[in-house]
Image (spheres, rainbow, N blue to C red):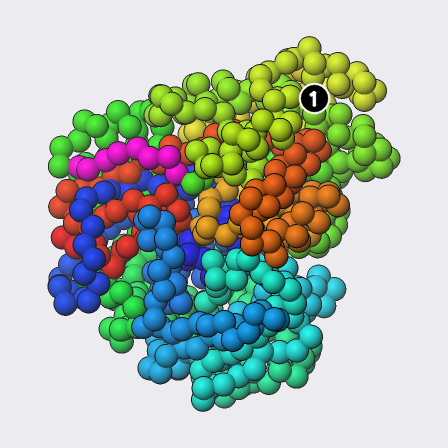
């Protein structure tokens, strides 16, 4: 994930995905690019396809897409594998102009340009700013559909100020914001490309299209902005092979996309003009989409790929240990598995409305608006959720020290995890209690079998195994868990067609408000319609809280509310298995997204 421009520290990782398998050897700090050998090429396997270029859009914000845009979009900063934030001053700079109100200036350096030669400038920064505002993520008006909608407390009363010959913007926040740098935004989709998609008949030059974008945002031209937002949200999705129109995948980063075969691979070639950041040593990268982890290992063994990236199981680990000339290992990654219960089928991400949906058993509307009855049913489902069995059967064979994860807001091993778990109420679901689950359903006055439509990544081996364990356990309590598995799960999230979902969240920054868009009411990544006034208020307070102890207290408050509301349940922290051919140098694992891709510019053979 592009470290991550979008102001969200969690990314929905594909149901087959976010467990990073990456190779690890000594890491070089040489990023000058003087070792470039144009004959060098590498092939990497990831277990999900690249399907969209604008990874700032909620439904397209997946690991598989952001792995690619991480290598094609330039940025003001990125995370190393400490992880620590590193500034990229060759691309541009940012600075605090004022503390009251918090005012930041972002400036792109001279010479930075898109792959069609158009300079990266204020229009691109303005587009990013507009896409993150609340007022331009309005389902009934201008609606960018951004995953970052509302994540930044921006002062939206006026547009940013343009300066430095059109290369900078300066804007303010409406209140102090602790994560302004961790969530520093970067231009992703070129503003003039968005304009071209929105108004294809005008055929303007890059400079003229950029000026149109600037004018629309500065003048709050809602007619133009409505068209731009629609283009930004839907115009950069790829349903098949690579489009002939290169405007749809312009790059200002180290690589440019040159080929895409649906469901097979995407090819990146080095951007010859790029010199405003770490320069890659490998001229060509091919990322193959191989979902089956066994097939990935076989491809690595046969020399068809040099690095593999997917979700490992015990068989994968055993197979990797038997390979010669391969470096591999297991780490505790910053990705966690969870089950979410749909608390409002009608409520979509960002506060949108799903029409024509059926309220499921966890939605108060299913019971004529009786919120307490729906909560009791959710509690019953969680009481029968076999979390420990999932960890014992599927995760401990990879990581013998694996434990059930019991927090919605902090990861195991972090300083506040134990104290959070001790008070958040997760102990209510520490083990399966079928008798208690039946009692809760009886208390709710629910009789007969309760049907639960269950969404997960159908073709992923581990997810299929989890589903089977969940279905068997829930059946004992009176739940009929219906197989709604689908390999297109990420595009289905939040549409109200299912009652429970199984996927993972992956941390992409160190921001303390990183979960906000996913867990706060109306958040752009909120897929189950959850909202709690106490938790929502705590999120808002957290954004302006700089005292670390108070930050943890607020996260504990949120965590406690979520478990108390029977939001869902966390299951385990991913055991990240990395693997790469020893012929590839400088492949280095990072616990934070984009995992082994983080230093792609140092890879060499």
Q: Residue furthest top?
A: 435
Q: Position of residue 223 (x, y in %)?
A: 68, 78
Q: Secondary structure at mark 1?
A: helix
Seen at 75% across and 30% down, the residue is: 375
Circle 1 Cα neighbour tier, 10 Å, few/some/many (<14 / 14–19 / ≥20) = many
Q: Residue at x 56, y 54 (%)?
A: 546
The residue tagged 1 is 380
Q: Is residue 255 magenta?
A: no
Taking 424 as reference, is 286 above or below it?
below
Asked if residue 548 shows in the view, the reply is yes
The residue at 29%/61% (across/down) is: 268
Main SS class of the magenta portion in the image = strand
- x, y percent for residue 340: 61, 36
Residue 310, placed above or below residue 27: above
Q: Residue furthest right?
A: 368
The magenta span reads 326-333
């Amino acid at each position: 994930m592009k470290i991550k421009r979008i102001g969200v520290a969690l990314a929905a990782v594909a149901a087959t995905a976010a467990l990073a398998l990456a190779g690890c050897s000594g890491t070089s700090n040489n990023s000058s690019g003087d070792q470039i050998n144009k004959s060098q090429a590498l092939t990497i396997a990831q277990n999900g396809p690249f399907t969209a270029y604008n990874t700032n859009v909620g439904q397209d914000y997946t690991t598989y897409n952001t792995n690619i845009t991480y290598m094609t979009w330039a940025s003001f900063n990125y995370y190393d594998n400490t992880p620590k934030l590193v500034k990229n001053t060759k691309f541009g700079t940012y600075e605090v102009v004022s503390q009251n109100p918090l005012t930041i200036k972002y400036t792109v350096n001279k010479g930075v340009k898109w792959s069609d030669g158009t300079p990266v400038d204020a229009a691109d920064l303005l587009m990013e700013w507009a896409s993150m505002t609340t007022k331009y993520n309005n389902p009934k008006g201008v609606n960018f559909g951004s995953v970052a909608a509302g994540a930044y407390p921006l002062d939206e009363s006026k547009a940013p100020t343009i300066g430095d010959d059109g290369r900078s913007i300066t804007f303010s926040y409406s209140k102090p914001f602790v994560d302004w740098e961790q969530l520093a935004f970067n231009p992703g989709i070129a503003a003039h490309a968005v304009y071209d998609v929105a108004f294809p008949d005008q055929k303007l030059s890059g400079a003229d299209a950029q000026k149109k974008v600037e004018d629309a945002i500065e003048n709050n031209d809602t007619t133009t902005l409505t068209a731009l937002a629609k283009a930004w949200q839907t115009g950069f999705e790829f349903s098949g092979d690579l489009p002939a129109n290169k405007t749809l995948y312009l790059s200002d980063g180290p690589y440019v996309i040159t080929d895409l075969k649906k469901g097979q691979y995407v090819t990146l070639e080095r951007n010859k003009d790029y010199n405003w950041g770490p320069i890659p040593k490998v001229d060509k990268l091919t990322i193959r989409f191989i979902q089956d982890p066994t097939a990935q290992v076989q491809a690595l063994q046969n020399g068809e790929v040099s690095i593999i990236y997917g979700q490992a199981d015990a068989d994968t680990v055993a197979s990797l240990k038997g390979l010669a000339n391969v470096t591999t290992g297991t780490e505790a990654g910053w990705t966690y598995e969870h089950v979410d219960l749909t608390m409002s089928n009608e409520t979509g991400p960002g506060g949108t409305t799903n029409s024509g949906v059926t309220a499921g058993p966890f939605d108060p509307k299913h019971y004529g608006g009786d919120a307490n009855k729906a909560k009791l049913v959710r509690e019953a489902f969680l009481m029968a959720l076999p979390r420990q069995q999932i960890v014992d059967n599927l995760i401990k064979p990879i990581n013998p020290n694996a434990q059930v994860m019991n927090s919605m807001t902090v990861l195991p091993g972090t300083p506040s995890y134990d104290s959070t778990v001790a008070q958040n109420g997760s102990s209510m679901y520490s083990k399966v209690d079928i008798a208690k689950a039946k009692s809760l359903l009886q208390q709710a006055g629910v009789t007969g079998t309760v049907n639960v439509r269950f969404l997960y990544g159908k073709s992923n081996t581990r997810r299929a195994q989890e589903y089977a364990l969940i279905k068997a356990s829930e059946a004992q309590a009176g739940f009929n868990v219906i197989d709604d598995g689908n390999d297109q799960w990420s595009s289905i999230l939040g549409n109200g067609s299912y009652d429970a979902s199984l996927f993972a969240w992956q941390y992409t920054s160190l921001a303390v408000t990183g979960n906000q868009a996913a867990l706060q009411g109306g958040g752009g990544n909120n897929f189950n319609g959850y909202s709690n006034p106490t938790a929502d208020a705590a999120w808002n307070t957290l954004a302006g809280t700089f005292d670390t102890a108070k930050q943890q207290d607020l996260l504990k408050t949120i965590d406690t509310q979520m478990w108390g509301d029977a939001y869902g349940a966390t299951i385990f922290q991913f055991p990240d298995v990395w693997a790469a051919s020893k012929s590839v140098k400088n492949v280095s694992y990072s616990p934070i997204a984009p995992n082994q891709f983080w230093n792609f510019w140092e890879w060499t053979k």
